[in-house]
Structures are given as C-alpha cells and as structure tokens.
Image: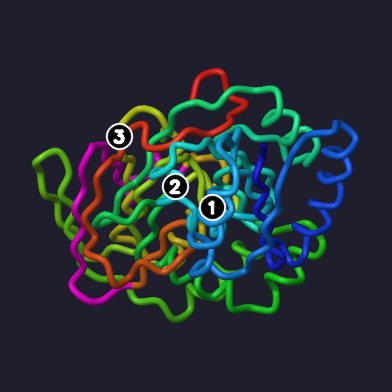
C-alpha cells in the first residue's frame, strides 16, 4: 500500500494536475493506494498518523508537492521508518533534484514502484530535521521575498520556478545589509566582518536549482557550508549567475566548510529558512543526522 500526500497549493496548482496523471497510472496498474490532501503543515502529522494506523504495511509515503510539504513530514518519516517517495510538483523541487528524481511524474512514479529506497542523511537544526538546506541572511530573505511575491505565481504558471528566485535576488539586493558572522566547524571558529549569507546544505542545490554547495552528498554524514562575505553589492550580483553551475566556489569572496557539526552566530537577528520554512527562532546549531530516513533515489551513488 502506498500513501500519496498531495498539497493542492504546491506549484500554483501543479500538484493536482500531476496527481490526476499519477492516479490514472496507479489505477491502470491496479496498485493499492490511499490519498491525503493537505495544505497545512500543522495538520500533516496527525492526519498521516491516523491514516497509517488503518493498515499494517506501507511501501512508501509519496509526496506530490514541493520541499515544504516534504519538510513537514520529516519527523514522521524518521519515527516510522517508512520510505519517502517524491513526485516533484513544487516551485523549487531541490529534494527531487538532490536525489536525481525525474521531473516527469510517471517516470518518478515508476522509480517508486520498481526501485529501492536508500538511506539518507538529514540536517538537525537544534533538533528540528531539515532535508535540503538552511539558508540564513541574504538568501533566506530572497526566499521570503519570492514566496510573498506575485512573480512567483507567474513563473510557476509558465514552468519557470528558477526565474522567480533570480528576480528575488534583484529585489532583495536593494535593501539587504550584510554584517558580522562567526562560523564554528571542526573545532575551529572563523569570523567575517561583513557576511551576506551562510548556507548549510545536505543536497547540492537550493532556491530552485542554485548549486550553492555542489559538493554536498546526502549520504556522507557531513554538512557542507557556504559563506559569502566581504564583497560589494555589485560583486554579489555577479556572483549569483556563477551559482547556477557551482562556479562561485572558486571566488575569494566565498569560503566553504565541511563538518558533522556547525555553529553560526550573527551579530543581529537574521531570517533563516530550512527547506524554505522559517527556522529563525532556532539557535543556529547544526549537526548531521546520518541515515535518518530512506528515500527512493535514481542515483546509483548518492
């Protein structure tokens, strides 16, 4: 039995259109399944738990939606050990991208029905699990601005979710002010007087495909950290096109860290987002959570 969880709001309604195709394929294959429609992270755990209690054996919990919907299920996935299947239908889809999951819904479904789940790490942010990345500073503010914008809906409607984040960078560049930050990793603390952003990653990309930590792997028990610091607004603007291919890591205004624990301290409150969800109230103390969940992946080596 497969449990499909659909967020009707994901991808500006793309999830419902995707579910229609998936449902037709499931019925054709005579596959046993149950469905839940939810747009509220607060209700997901209780609804899914109640549904799981109705059967003894579950092959997978399958999300038709985006990274935010997956984020809301992480505690339950850890608790139950049921594998996660992903059929991407959000705007960013960085979880799907990080696991090599096809964009085509029927190809993603076939992976879930015929493939095998593999162990994957999570990021633990003061005990809260995160799948993709925690962005703090400029990048988090970009995400906040994008999520509250009209242009995100327009970009999603034409299948250009990444473009919304590019517009968001320009939008945020005008008002954001960098400041001091200290990063502790591997027992060493490094301070920067003017940092724009820090990103702690479990998968290579965030923000709809920006390769912020291209070396990140979801099964190595390590966290990858990118700090962008000591640069002008113009330099930051020219940096973002290089992030599309991960070429920014060679620039002197970028410093990378790797470790199983990381601590980040700003001189002032900063917006922070994990999987695109607000985690600003949490202490910026991170640890890798190796093999915390299982995920259906198309990659032979994740």
Quadrant containing the N terminus is top right
Q: Is there any visible trace of residue 163 in the rendered image?
A: no
What residue lies at 33% left-to-right and 70% top-to-bottom? Answer: 280
Q: Residue 250 location in percent, x, y?
A: 39, 38
Q: Which residue is mark 2?
A: 131
Residue drawn 50% across the image and 37% down it: 82
Q: The residue tagged with tag 3: helix, strand or loop?
A: loop
Q: Which residue: 83% across, 46% down?
A: 23
Closer-to-camera residue (74/123): 74
- Locate residue 185, reporting x and y percent: 17, 43
Q: Are marks 1 and 2 in contact (CB under 8 Å)?
A: yes
Of the residues under marks 1 and 3, which one precedes in the sequence? 1
* Foreground disc of the pair 1, 2: 1
Front-most of 161 and 125? 125
In the image, the segment drawn in magenta is 248-270
State the scheme by which the image is colored.
rainbow
Q: Considering only vertical position in the picture, is 275 above or below 169?
A: above
Which disc number belongs to residue 70?
Answer: 1
Residue 62 vertical position relative to residue 138 in the rendered view, above or below: above
Query: Which of marks 3 and 2 precedes in the sequence?
Result: 2
Kindly report the distance in space between the C-alpha atoms of the residues bearing marks 2 and 3: 13 Å
Q: CA distance from mark 1 to mark 3?
A: 21 Å
Left or right: residue 32 versus residue 117 is right
> Is residue 64 a member of the stretch shown in magenta?
no
The residue wearing badge 3 is: 222
Q: How many marks?
A: 3
Whether residue 254 appears in magenta in the rendering, the answer is yes
């Amino acid at each position: 039995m497969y449990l499909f969880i659909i967020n009707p709001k994901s991808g500006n309604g793309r999830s419902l259109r995707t579910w229609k195709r998936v449902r037709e394929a499931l019925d054709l294959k005579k596959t046993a399944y149950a469905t839940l429609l939810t747009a509220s992270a607060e209700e997901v755990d209780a609804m899914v738990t109640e549904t799981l209690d109705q059967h003894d054996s579950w092959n997978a919990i399958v999300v038709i939606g985006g990274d935010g919907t997956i984020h809301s299920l992480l505690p339950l996935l850890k608790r139950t050990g049921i594998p996660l299947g992903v059929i991407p239908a959000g705007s960013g889809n960085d979880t799907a991208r990080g696991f090599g999951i096809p964009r085509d819904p029927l190809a993603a479904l076939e992976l879930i029905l015929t493939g095998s789940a593999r162990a994957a790490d999570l990021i633990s942010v003061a005990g809260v699990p995160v799948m993709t990345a925690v962005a703090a500073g400029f990048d988090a503010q970009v995400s906040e601005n994008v999520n509250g914008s009209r242009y995100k809906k327009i970009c999603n409607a034409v299948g250009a979710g990444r473009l919304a984040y590019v517009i968001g960078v320009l939008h945020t560049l005008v008002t954001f002010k960098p400041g001091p930050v200290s990063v502790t990793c591997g027992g060493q603390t490094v301070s920067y007087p003017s940092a724009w952003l820090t990103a702690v990653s479990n998968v290579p990309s965030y923000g709809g495909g920006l390769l912020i930590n291209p070396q990140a792997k979801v099964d190595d028990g390590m966290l990858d950290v990118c700090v962008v610091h000591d640069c002008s607004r113009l330099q930051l603007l020219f940096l973002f096109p290089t992030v599309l291919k991960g070429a920014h890591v060679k620039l002197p205004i970028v410093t990378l860290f790797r470790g199983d624990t990381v601590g980040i301290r700003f001189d002032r409150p900063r917006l922070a987002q994990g999987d695109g969800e607000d985690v600003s109230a949490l202490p910026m103390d991170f640890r890798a959570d190796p093999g915390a969940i299982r995920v259906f992946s198309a990659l032979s080596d994740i």
